[in-house]
Image (cartoon, rainbow, N blue to C red):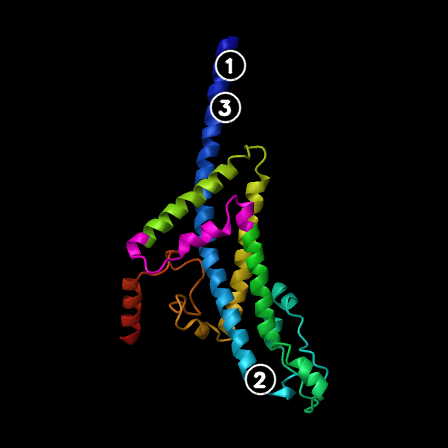
Amino acid sequence: MAANAATLTHHLSLFSDNNIRIDNAALALIMAKELAFLNRTIQMITLIANRYNEEQEDLVWGHDDYYSSDGSDGSDGEEDLEYGGGVALQRSQSHDNPYTPPAAAAAARQSRNPLATTFLIASGRIMKRFNELCELAGTNVILVNAMTTRDQPHSSAANLEKQLATQSLVVSDIFLHFGKFDAHHRDPVVITFLELRDISVYACKIMSMFAFSNLFRLTAGTDFDIYQPDDAIFTQGRDYCLPRRQEEEEVAAAILA
Protein backbone atom coordinates (compact mmCIF):
# COMPACT_ATOMS: atom_id res chain seq x y z
CA MET A 1 0.00 0.00 0.00
CA ALA A 2 2.84 2.34 0.87
CA ALA A 3 4.49 1.62 -2.47
CA ASN A 4 1.23 2.23 -4.33
CA ALA A 5 0.71 5.51 -2.45
CA ALA A 6 4.24 6.63 -3.29
CA THR A 7 3.70 5.80 -6.96
CA LEU A 8 0.39 7.69 -7.01
CA THR A 9 1.98 10.74 -5.36
CA HIS A 10 4.81 10.62 -7.88
CA HIS A 11 2.37 10.62 -10.82
CA LEU A 12 0.33 13.43 -9.31
CA SER A 13 3.50 15.45 -8.85
CA LEU A 14 4.49 14.91 -12.47
CA PHE A 15 1.04 15.93 -13.63
CA SER A 16 1.21 19.13 -11.58
CA ASP A 17 4.71 19.91 -12.88
CA ASN A 18 3.58 19.41 -16.46
CA ASN A 19 0.68 21.80 -15.96
CA ILE A 20 3.04 24.45 -14.64
CA ARG A 21 5.41 23.93 -17.57
CA ILE A 22 2.56 24.32 -20.06
CA ASP A 23 1.39 27.48 -18.29
CA ASN A 24 4.91 28.87 -18.27
CA ALA A 25 5.35 28.16 -21.97
CA ALA A 26 2.10 29.97 -22.84
CA LEU A 27 2.87 32.89 -20.54
CA ALA A 28 6.41 33.20 -21.93
CA LEU A 29 5.12 33.41 -25.50
CA ILE A 30 2.50 36.01 -24.53
CA MET A 31 5.03 38.06 -22.58
CA ALA A 32 7.59 37.98 -25.42
CA LYS A 33 5.09 39.21 -28.00
CA GLU A 34 3.71 41.92 -25.69
CA LEU A 35 7.24 43.11 -24.93
CA ALA A 36 7.85 43.37 -28.66
CA PHE A 37 4.68 45.41 -29.20
CA LEU A 38 5.40 47.66 -26.23
CA ASN A 39 9.01 48.15 -27.27
CA ARG A 40 7.97 49.42 -30.70
CA THR A 41 5.42 51.73 -29.12
CA ILE A 42 8.00 53.18 -26.75
CA GLN A 43 10.43 53.69 -29.63
CA MET A 44 7.72 55.63 -31.43
CA ILE A 45 7.04 57.68 -28.28
CA THR A 46 10.73 58.51 -27.94
CA LEU A 47 11.00 59.53 -31.59
CA ILE A 48 7.98 61.85 -31.42
CA ALA A 49 9.03 63.37 -28.09
CA ASN A 50 12.51 64.18 -29.38
CA ARG A 51 11.29 65.57 -32.71
CA TYR A 52 8.63 67.69 -31.01
CA ASN A 53 11.20 69.12 -28.61
CA GLU A 54 13.50 70.00 -31.52
CA GLU A 55 10.59 71.59 -33.39
CA GLN A 56 9.64 73.74 -30.40
CA GLU A 57 13.21 74.86 -29.82
CA ASP A 58 13.42 75.94 -33.46
CA LEU A 59 10.14 77.85 -33.17
CA VAL A 60 11.07 79.82 -30.04
CA TRP A 61 14.67 80.50 -30.97
CA GLY A 62 15.19 84.23 -30.74
CA HIS A 63 11.74 84.96 -29.25
CA ASP A 64 12.69 86.20 -25.79
CA ASP A 65 9.12 87.04 -24.78
CA TYR A 66 7.97 83.44 -25.28
CA TYR A 67 8.73 82.64 -21.67
CA SER A 68 7.41 84.33 -18.56
CA SER A 69 9.33 87.21 -17.01
CA ASP A 70 10.91 85.04 -14.33
CA GLY A 71 12.41 82.65 -16.88
CA SER A 72 10.25 79.75 -15.71
CA ASP A 73 8.28 77.52 -18.01
CA GLY A 74 5.67 76.87 -15.31
CA SER A 75 5.31 73.17 -15.99
CA ASP A 76 4.77 70.39 -13.52
CA GLY A 77 5.92 68.08 -16.31
CA GLU A 78 5.67 64.41 -15.59
CA GLU A 79 3.08 64.78 -12.81
CA ASP A 80 0.51 65.98 -15.36
CA LEU A 81 1.04 62.97 -17.55
CA GLU A 82 1.33 60.50 -14.71
CA TYR A 83 -1.94 61.45 -13.07
CA GLY A 84 -4.37 62.06 -15.87
CA GLY A 85 -2.59 63.62 -18.80
CA GLY A 86 -5.15 66.23 -19.81
CA VAL A 87 -3.74 69.04 -17.69
CA ALA A 88 -0.52 69.27 -19.65
CA LEU A 89 -2.37 69.97 -22.87
CA GLN A 90 -4.10 72.98 -21.36
CA ARG A 91 -0.98 74.73 -20.12
CA SER A 92 0.16 77.87 -21.89
CA GLN A 93 2.75 80.52 -21.29
CA SER A 94 1.94 83.69 -19.44
CA HIS A 95 2.13 86.90 -21.50
CA ASP A 96 0.99 89.31 -18.80
CA ASN A 97 4.34 91.00 -19.02
CA PRO A 98 5.40 91.30 -22.68
CA TYR A 99 8.89 92.41 -21.67
CA THR A 100 11.45 89.85 -20.53
CA PRO A 101 14.57 91.19 -18.81
CA PRO A 102 17.77 90.18 -20.64
CA ALA A 103 19.03 88.02 -17.76
CA ALA A 104 15.72 86.17 -17.49
CA ALA A 105 15.57 85.77 -21.26
CA ALA A 106 19.02 84.20 -21.29
CA ALA A 107 17.95 81.75 -18.60
CA ALA A 108 14.69 81.09 -20.40
CA ARG A 109 16.52 80.00 -23.53
CA GLN A 110 17.78 77.05 -21.55
CA SER A 111 14.22 75.98 -20.83
CA ARG A 112 11.91 74.09 -23.16
CA ASN A 113 8.29 74.32 -24.09
CA PRO A 114 6.43 72.80 -21.09
CA LEU A 115 4.55 70.27 -23.15
CA ALA A 116 7.71 69.23 -24.98
CA THR A 117 9.43 68.88 -21.61
CA THR A 118 6.54 66.78 -20.32
CA PHE A 119 6.84 64.42 -23.28
CA LEU A 120 10.62 64.14 -22.93
CA ILE A 121 10.35 63.28 -19.25
CA ALA A 122 7.55 60.82 -19.93
CA SER A 123 9.51 59.07 -22.70
CA GLY A 124 12.56 58.74 -20.47
CA ARG A 125 10.48 57.42 -17.60
CA ILE A 126 8.64 54.82 -19.67
CA MET A 127 11.89 53.62 -21.25
CA LYS A 128 13.42 53.14 -17.80
CA ARG A 129 10.40 51.19 -16.64
CA PHE A 130 10.48 49.06 -19.78
CA ASN A 131 14.15 48.16 -19.26
CA GLU A 132 13.31 47.12 -15.70
CA LEU A 133 10.34 45.10 -16.98
CA CYS A 134 12.59 43.13 -19.34
CA GLU A 135 14.83 42.26 -16.40
CA LEU A 136 11.79 41.38 -14.30
CA ALA A 137 10.70 38.95 -17.03
CA GLY A 138 14.13 37.31 -17.11
CA THR A 139 15.35 38.73 -20.41
CA ASN A 140 16.98 41.99 -21.56
CA VAL A 141 16.08 44.92 -23.76
CA ILE A 142 18.85 44.19 -26.28
CA LEU A 143 17.25 40.88 -27.24
CA VAL A 144 13.79 42.45 -27.29
CA ASN A 145 15.07 45.15 -29.63
CA ALA A 146 16.52 42.52 -31.95
CA MET A 147 13.07 40.94 -32.25
CA THR A 148 11.69 44.02 -33.99
CA THR A 149 14.58 45.68 -35.81
CA ARG A 150 16.08 45.12 -39.23
CA ASP A 151 19.75 45.22 -40.08
CA GLN A 152 20.88 47.01 -43.22
CA PRO A 153 21.67 46.05 -45.91
CA HIS A 154 20.46 42.55 -45.05
CA SER A 155 17.59 41.07 -47.05
CA SER A 156 14.08 40.70 -45.70
CA ALA A 157 14.58 36.94 -45.42
CA ALA A 158 17.79 37.37 -43.41
CA ASN A 159 16.17 39.89 -41.11
CA LEU A 160 13.14 37.67 -40.59
CA GLU A 161 15.40 34.76 -39.72
CA LYS A 162 17.24 36.93 -37.19
CA GLN A 163 13.98 38.15 -35.65
CA LEU A 164 12.59 34.64 -35.28
CA ALA A 165 15.85 33.35 -33.79
CA THR A 166 15.90 36.19 -31.28
CA GLN A 167 12.25 35.61 -30.47
CA SER A 168 13.11 32.03 -29.56
CA LEU A 169 15.85 33.27 -27.23
CA VAL A 170 13.51 35.72 -25.51
CA VAL A 171 10.76 33.11 -25.10
CA SER A 172 13.32 30.66 -23.74
CA ASP A 173 14.69 33.22 -21.25
CA ILE A 174 11.24 34.05 -19.95
CA PHE A 175 10.17 30.38 -19.80
CA LEU A 176 13.23 29.42 -17.75
CA HIS A 177 12.73 32.41 -15.46
CA PHE A 178 9.06 31.64 -14.82
CA GLY A 179 10.05 28.01 -14.20
CA LYS A 180 11.81 29.08 -11.00
CA PHE A 181 8.43 29.66 -9.33
CA ASP A 182 6.25 26.71 -8.36
CA ALA A 183 2.46 26.67 -8.08
CA HIS A 184 2.54 28.09 -4.56
CA HIS A 185 4.96 30.96 -5.27
CA ARG A 186 3.69 32.64 -8.45
CA ASP A 187 3.72 36.21 -7.18
CA PRO A 188 6.79 37.22 -9.27
CA VAL A 189 5.04 36.05 -12.45
CA VAL A 190 1.86 37.95 -11.56
CA ILE A 191 3.85 41.08 -10.69
CA THR A 192 5.60 40.94 -14.07
CA PHE A 193 2.30 40.90 -15.95
CA LEU A 194 0.86 43.66 -13.76
CA GLU A 195 3.86 45.84 -14.57
CA LEU A 196 3.39 45.05 -18.27
CA ARG A 197 -0.22 46.20 -17.96
CA ASP A 198 0.69 49.41 -16.12
CA ILE A 199 3.37 50.40 -18.63
CA SER A 200 1.01 49.65 -21.51
CA VAL A 201 -1.64 51.91 -19.98
CA TYR A 202 0.96 54.65 -19.54
CA ALA A 203 2.02 54.23 -23.18
CA CYS A 204 -1.60 54.48 -24.33
CA LYS A 205 -1.98 57.70 -22.35
CA ILE A 206 1.06 59.24 -24.02
CA MET A 207 -0.06 58.12 -27.47
CA SER A 208 -3.49 59.64 -26.86
CA MET A 209 -1.87 62.95 -25.96
CA PHE A 210 0.20 62.76 -29.15
CA ALA A 211 -3.00 62.27 -31.12
CA PHE A 212 -4.71 65.21 -29.39
CA SER A 213 -1.65 67.37 -30.08
CA ASN A 214 -1.44 66.34 -33.76
CA LEU A 215 2.07 64.96 -33.29
CA PHE A 216 1.79 61.78 -35.34
CA ARG A 217 2.90 63.97 -38.25
CA LEU A 218 6.40 63.90 -36.75
CA THR A 219 6.83 60.26 -37.73
CA ALA A 220 7.07 61.25 -41.42
CA GLY A 221 9.96 59.55 -43.15
CA THR A 222 10.34 56.84 -40.49
CA ASP A 223 9.16 53.27 -40.05
CA PHE A 224 6.32 54.58 -37.90
CA ASP A 225 4.58 56.78 -40.47
CA ILE A 226 2.17 53.97 -41.39
CA TYR A 227 0.35 54.48 -38.09
CA GLN A 228 -2.65 56.76 -37.78
CA PRO A 229 -3.97 58.51 -34.63
CA ASP A 230 -7.05 56.28 -34.51
CA ASP A 231 -5.04 53.05 -34.64
CA ALA A 232 -5.24 51.03 -31.44
CA ILE A 233 -1.77 50.33 -30.13
CA PHE A 234 -2.03 46.62 -29.41
CA THR A 235 -4.87 45.61 -31.74
CA GLN A 236 -5.79 45.86 -35.43
CA GLY A 237 -4.08 42.51 -35.98
CA ARG A 238 -0.71 44.11 -36.70
CA ASP A 239 2.37 41.94 -36.63
CA TYR A 240 4.95 43.36 -34.26
CA CYS A 241 7.71 43.04 -36.88
CA LEU A 242 8.56 46.04 -38.99
CA PRO A 243 6.59 46.19 -42.26
CA ARG A 244 8.30 44.63 -45.22
CA ARG A 245 8.87 46.55 -48.42
CA GLN A 246 5.91 44.93 -50.17
CA GLU A 247 3.59 45.95 -47.34
CA GLU A 248 4.96 49.49 -47.43
CA GLU A 249 4.28 49.68 -51.18
CA GLU A 250 0.74 48.38 -50.67
CA VAL A 251 0.08 51.02 -48.02
CA ALA A 252 1.49 53.75 -50.26
CA ALA A 253 -0.63 52.57 -53.20
CA ALA A 254 -3.75 52.55 -51.03
CA ILE A 255 -3.06 56.11 -49.86
CA LEU A 256 -2.53 57.37 -53.42
CA ALA A 257 -5.69 55.63 -54.58
Percent x, y for residue 10? 49, 19
Which mark's residue is nearer the viewer, 2 or 1?
2
Which mark's residue is nearer the viewer, 2 or 3?
2
Mark 2 neighbour class, 10 Å CA radius: few under 14, some 14 to 19, many 20 or more: few
Which mark is on residue 61? 2
Residue 238 in view: no
> Residue 238 versus residue 104: which sits nearer the camera?
104
Q: How far apart are marks 2 and 1 (CA)?
A: 80 Å
Q: Distance between the residues labelled 2 and 3?
A: 70 Å
Q: Which of marks 2 and 1 is nearer the N terminus?
A: 1
Give residue 216's quadrant in the image: bottom left
Which mark is on residue 6? 1
* Magenta-span inclusion, residue 136: yes
Percent x, y for residue 185? 59, 35
Q: Earlier in the sequence, mark 3 or mark 1?
A: 1
* Tags 2 and 1 touching, CB below 8 Å: no
Which span is picked out in magenta? 133-158
Most extreme residue toward the top, as rendered?
1
Using the image, determine if residue 100 lies above or below residue 159.
Answer: below
Disc 3, SS: helix
Residue at mark 3: 13
